[in-house]
Structures are given as structure tokens and as C-alpha cells.
Image (cartoon, rainbow, N blue to C red):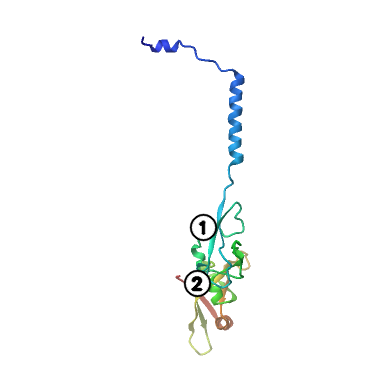
Amino acid sequence: MAISVDDLRQIPLPSIAPRTMLGIGLAAVAALLVLVVTRPPATAPVLVAGADLPAGTPLAELAIDVRQVVNSFGLVEGDQLGELGDWVLAAPITAGEPILPSLLRPGEAVAAPDSIAIELDAAHAVLGQLNPGDRVDVYATSTRPGEPTETKLIATSMYILEAHIAESSTNKDRVTLLLAVDRATARALTTAMHAGEIDLVKVGR
């Protein structure tokens, strides 16, 4: 016997008691809470020493591992070295220790272990468009009585360790740089700063 749509509409649906509905709702909430409580915390990858690591050797040449941690604050986050491959450790660390940013030094700071601070008008320092990691050539200009003005290139591809732009009204448009140098370059820069003016040219990497 065929059943029509009208026949289906006349079939009474079972009623659900309010207490049953409440119980179903509470069970769903409890299940959701269990999922939230038992869900593993989010982790982030950080770099750690895969063996006892010496100081002064580029990280790309060392055994570096990756570990997942819940809190990566103060650690070197990532699953590969990237631009840190040429950087070195300032002190040795043992296997399993995390690599801390405070222990890292750019390779250039090892080749030129000394540092010198210079302060210039922005007009002589690429309008202040300089950042740590940039490189600059240094030109010195001197004028002696009775002689023509002379400009010489005294240092090439110098590595900037720190760069600061003055914001106070008294030192407006002043740029302070910390450069990695060796002894000879430090002497040449100091002489040039006292003898005349210096200008910086930002160079490509």
C-alpha cells in the first residue's frame, strides 16, 4: 500500500522531555570542555645545539637541531638557520642547550673584533637610512690652507653593528653608528673625524 505525503504528516512525532534536552545540552558542553582541557598546547620550533658547540665557528658548519617548545620567548625561533648561517657563538654551549640571541655575533664582528662609534649629520650618513647589518664605504674630506680640497676612500664595506637616529630637538637629524673595525681602520677613522668631514655611502651586499 502506498503512503502519501499527507499520511506522513499525520504520523505523530515523539516528544522529548525538557529534562532530556537539558541532559543532552550538558553532555555536549562537557564533551567540549574535555576537548579544550585535553588539547595539547601550541608549540614553536627553536634552534638548539645538536652537539657541544665551540665559539667563533659559523653556525652553518655546526650541528644544529630543532626542538618544539611551548614558550619560545628569549630563544631563536625557527626550524632552519636562514640568515644566521654566517653568525657565530660568542661562547661555547653544550649539546641540547638552546641557542640564545644574546650569544650570537655576526661573522663580521669576528673578522673585525673591535668597534667604534661615530656620529654624523644625516646628510652625511645616507639620510639616516641605515640599519644593523648594512655595509658602508667611508670617504674622508680634508682641506688644508693653500691646497685643494681632497676626498679619499679610507674604509670599504664596513659592517654596521648598531644604528640610532636622534629624536631630540637639540640633536635633530643626527645619526650614531657602531661599526665593526680592526685596529688599522679604527685609527684611520679617528684621524679622519678629527681632520675633516666624513661621508658614508651605503653599498650593496
Q: Quadrant of residue 25?
A: top right
Q: Quadrant of the N terminus?
A: top left
According to the picture, the residue beneath numbered tag 2 turns out to be 135
Residue at figure coordinates x 61%, y 32% from the top left: 30
Asked whether 110 or 149 is in front, the reply is 110
Q: Quadrant of the C terminus?
A: bottom left
Label 2, residues with CA under 10 Å away: few <14, some 14-19, many ≥20: many
> Residue 113: x and y, percent?
58, 76
Q: Residue lying farthest bottom?
A: 146
Amino acid type assigned to the residue bearing label 2 in the image: Arg
Q: Is residue 9 above or below residue 141?
A: above
Asked whether 62 or 176 is in front, the reply is 62
Compute the Cα span from label 1 to label 2. 28 Å
Residue at figure coordinates x 57%, y 48% from the top left: 42
The kind of secondary structure element at disc 1 is loop
Q: Nearer the viewer, mark 1 or mark 2?
A: 1
Amino acid type assigned to the residue bearing label 1 in the image: Asp
The kind of secondary structure element at disc 2 is strand
Marks 1 & 2, CB-CB < 8 Å contact: no
Q: Residue lying farthest left?
A: 2
According to the picture, the residue beneath numbered tag 1 turns out to be 79
Residue at figure coordinates x 50%, y 14% from the top left: 13
Q: Is residue 23 above or below residue 204?
A: above
Label 1, residues with CA under 10 Å away: few <14, some 14-19, many ≥20: some
